[in-house]
Amino acid sequence: MHELSIVLSIIEQIEEETAKRGGGQVEAIYVRVGVLSGVDTEALRFAYDLAREGTGLAGSRLEIEAVLLLVFCPQCSTTHAPRPPNIACPCCITPEQEILHGRELEVRAFEIVQ
Amino acid sequence: MSSQPRIIEVRARILKENDLLARELRERFQQADVTAISFVSSPGAGKTTFLEKLMSMMSAEHRIAALVGDLATENDANRLSRACSQVRQITTGTVCHLDAKMVAKALEGWNLDELDFLFVENVGNLVCPSSYDLGEQMRFVLLSATEGEDKPLKYPTIFNTADAALITKMDLAQAAELDLAAMRCNIQSVRPGMPVLEVSSKTGQGIEQIAGIIAASAVGRAIQATHTGQ
């Protein structure tokens, strides 16, 4: 349950960004969470509802975009979207695959009224 | 003043502060020629006992320091200090993982130039440590023979961030009726190509081999650094 630490980092970043732009009312925060990021989206929502209270983001909502896994197989030169936990290439089961998407843990944007 | 909401793009890593600190740490380790390795597992998989054995074996030839994370107590640091002289406990309080800031703080006052290896034992947890880069150059995930073959499938993320897996407590494999082939297969399915080694801190199985691999990786990194002019 490290989602609370993650949420505190999100709040800190958005408060910084808002202050840089002269303040305003934050309506929403858009984040991207990969299936292999190690973060549970339900726990993130729960933690956000608690953590936003008493901050400048108290009235805001958290919009979570789940990012699915996309893997590149150098053997077949193709990308495929395996269902975790199994990430082996369905064609050749080759090791050393490159994970293109699925590890994201990022703030994409926020919505503000000034 | 407009009252229309507008969207501002940020596109930043949520843990960018941790990532930046971890990058700084990695650079410091590289400059000081220190190989930093972290160890993660569930509680009770045998990280501390394994590190005691590993450090006892390596400390004759190498200068080693260790950091060990737990929510409370100095017990593990006391245990590890029998195997090497430079050990610091990081007590996280209620936090379930180590982060780069805790590592940086714990290193204060140590001269990295006087070290060859830094071992970092994370808090026993197979979930949260996966999100935090500690600046380590190598991450080992430990899984004991008594834990169940499907653990890699249940906790794929941590296995996916590791560079090698160690199956510990191999002396208990038979008693626990471990299906070793299934466990290895499950590790490969979540992290194709990851090296898997079998160890027993009790009998000493595999410890020398891992000490050799760790020492060789340090040499390899040094050669690579010379070639790239770093």
Image (spheres, coloured by chain):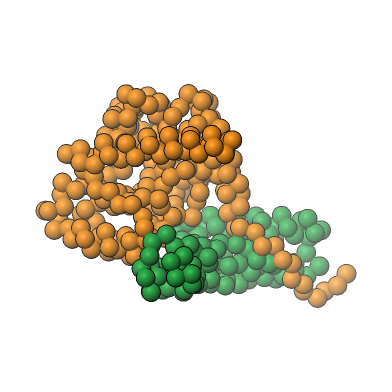
Chain colours: A green, B orange
Quarter where residue B130 is shown: bottom left
Residue B177 percent across, percent down from the top left: 13, 58
Question: Is A15 on the left-hand or right-hand side of B144?
Answer: right
Query: Hey, which quadrant is residue B201 in on the image?
Result: top left
In the rendered image, residue B99, in percent from the top left (x then y), is placed at 50, 46
What residue lies at 43% left-to-right and 34% top-to-bottom?
Answer: B219
> Left or right: B51 with respect to A28?
left
Residue B167: tell me if it is visible: yes
Residue B159 horizontal/vertical position (percent): 38, 57
Q: Residue at x 57, y 59 (%)?
A: A7
Query: Can residue A59 be seen in this snapshot?
Result: no
The quadrant of the rendering that contains the N terminus of chain B is bottom right
Q: Is residue B147 above or below residue B71?
A: below
Q: Nearer the viewer, residue B69 or A38?
A: A38
The percent coordinates of residue A70 (x first, y second) are 50, 70
Q: Which residue lies at the image location 20% right of the left edge and 54% below the top edge?
A: B146
The relative height of residue B61 versus residue B49 in the rendered view (above or below) is above
Query: Which quarter of the figure is the C terminus of chain B placed in?
Result: top right
Up/down of B226 relative to A35, above or below: above
Q: Is residue B39 left or right of residue A106?
A: left
